[in-house]
Amino acid sequence: MTPTAPNPAYDPNNVFARILRGEIPCHKVYENDAALAFHDITSAAPVHVLVIPRGAYTDFHDFTRRATPEEIAKFWQAVDHVVQQENLLPAGFRLITNTGPDSGQEVPHFHVHLLGGEKLGPLLSRKS
Ligand code: AMP
């Protein structure tokens, strides 16, 4: 499962890269050979899990362009596994991925936020 080429924009010292290397701890929820899922340190809902690929991708766009079909499939299978493990159906859940400055992306390693466990309210609260 090797991506097409290294991404020079990827920062190998971002916090999720360090979690993947075991340099800092996480509260693991699930893993497979392409993805790791763990609790967000600042929970925004009763269930707030981050799912990240093991490969070095900066964001959704980078992942979608450069990851192998097998990596992409196993990443989304991991997301689906956590949905079931956390009993988020049939009540439902929300998936969010931030990409780039307009989104407020803080960690430059592709991740999805999986949120649920209560009614989540409006998608965005716009700044005035
Ligand atoms: P984003 O703004 O989409 O890049 O979200 C990054 C998320 O990573 C935030 O919700 C943070 O609370 C979360 N986060 C940052 N550091 C850690 C960490 N060490 N363990 C778990 N979650 C983290």
Image (spheres, grey):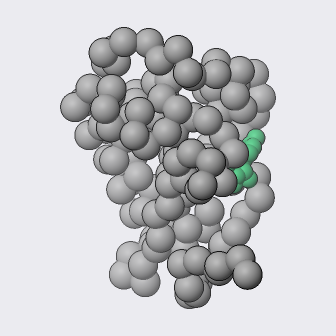
**Residue positioned 69% across, 45% down in the render:** 106
Which residue is depicted at the point 59% across and 56% down?
103
Q: Is residue 126 above or below residue 28?
A: below
Residue 12, image x, y percentages: 64, 18
Q: Measured along the vertical axis of the image, is residue 9 above or below residue 128? A: above
Quarter of the view holding residue 65 = top left
Q: Nearer the viewer, residue 39 or 15?
A: 15
Taking the image as shown, residue 29 lies to the left or right of residue 15, namely: left
Question: Residue at position x 43%, y 43% from top?
Answer: 60
Q: Would residue 49 be visible to someone looking at this image? A: no
Residue at the left extreme?
Answer: 69
Q: Residue at x 45, y 56 (%)?
A: 82
Q: Residue 3 placed where, x, y %?
A: 34, 18
Residue 70, how many percent across, how many down?
24, 30
Is 58 left, or right, of 105 in this rendering?
A: left
**Along the line of sight, the residue nearer the viewer: 77 or 96:** 96
Q: Name the quadrant of the C terminus.
A: bottom right
Residue 33: tell me if it is visible.
yes
Counting the numbered discs, the total is 0
| Outermost residue toward the front in this view | 128
Measured along the vertical axis of the image, is residue 41 above or below residue 46?
above
User: Where residue 118 appears, x then y in whole percent?
Assistant: 58, 83
Q: Which of 29/100 is in front?
A: 100
**Quadrant where the image shows the N terminus:** top left
